[in-house]
Image: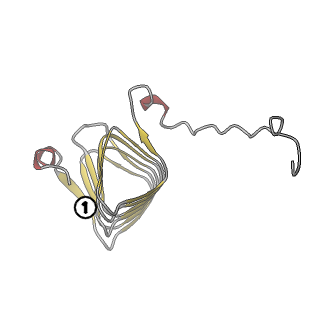
């Protein structure tokens, strides 16, 4: 996934093992690898070299915010990646992904929106999109209307 040069700058210092379940929010300031299950929001401190990786055995239910992300497991929640997100062939995401740079392998699945992050959209990530009601005033009148 990430090239070796990027890997050297983002050493994994914490591993959540395959038999581990975490219920609650997780904040991390260095590399984190998930083989287990997390139910809660995950947020990295904003260092460019911080990476979160989720293996094909890993699963997260909650929102994720991190500079770099590798997914080959399952995420149910919205994702914001300020640098680069990589989706492996077994990645399953149910939620929106806001990204600056994305790499997606054949077989990865996303049920949600891909939102390219520019400098102007960066400040609006936490805002929910507003959906305007459909007006019935503009409907054509006639048979079946």
Query: Around disc 1, counting alpha carbons within 10 Å, would you say few (fewer than 14), some (14 to 19), or many (20 or more)?
Result: some
**Furthest-front residue in view?**
143
Label 1: which secondary element: strand
Residue 73 appears left or right of 2: right
Residue found at the very far top of the displayed protein: 120
- Kindly indicate the quadrant of the structure image that contains residue 132: top right
Residue 12 located left or right of residue 118: left
**Position of the N terminus by quadrant:** bottom left
| 17 or 128: nearer the viewer | 128
Q: Residue at x 39, y 35 (%)?
A: 117
Horizontal and vertical percent position of residue 129: 58, 38
**Vertical arrangement, residue 101 with respect to residue 112, above or below:** above
What residue sits right under mark 1 in the picture?
15
Residue 106 in the image: state x and y as whole percent. Answer: 30, 60
Please provide percent x and percent y for residue 101: 30, 40
The residue sitting at 11% across, 47% down in the picture is 8
Residue at the location (34% across, 66% down)? Answer: 58
């Amino acid at each position: 996934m990430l090239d070796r040069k990027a890997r050297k700058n983002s050493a994994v210092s914490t591993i959540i093992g395959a038999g581990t379940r975490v219920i609650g929010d997780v904040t991390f300031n260095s590399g984190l690898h998930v083989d287990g299950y997390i139910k809660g929001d995950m947020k990295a401190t904003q260092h460019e070299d911080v990476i979160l990786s989720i293996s094909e055995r890993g699963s997260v239910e909650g929102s994720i915010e991190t500079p770099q992300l590798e997914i080959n497991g399952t995420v149910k929640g919205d994702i914001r990646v300020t640098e680069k997100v990589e989706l492996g062939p077994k990645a399953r995401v149910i939620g929106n992904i806001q990204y600056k740079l994305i790499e997606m392998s054949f077989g990865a699945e996303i049920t949600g929106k891909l939102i390219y992050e520019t400098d102007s959209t960066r400040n609006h990530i936490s805002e929910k999109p507003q959906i305007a009601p459909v007006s019935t005033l503009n409907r054509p009148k006639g048979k079946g209307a």
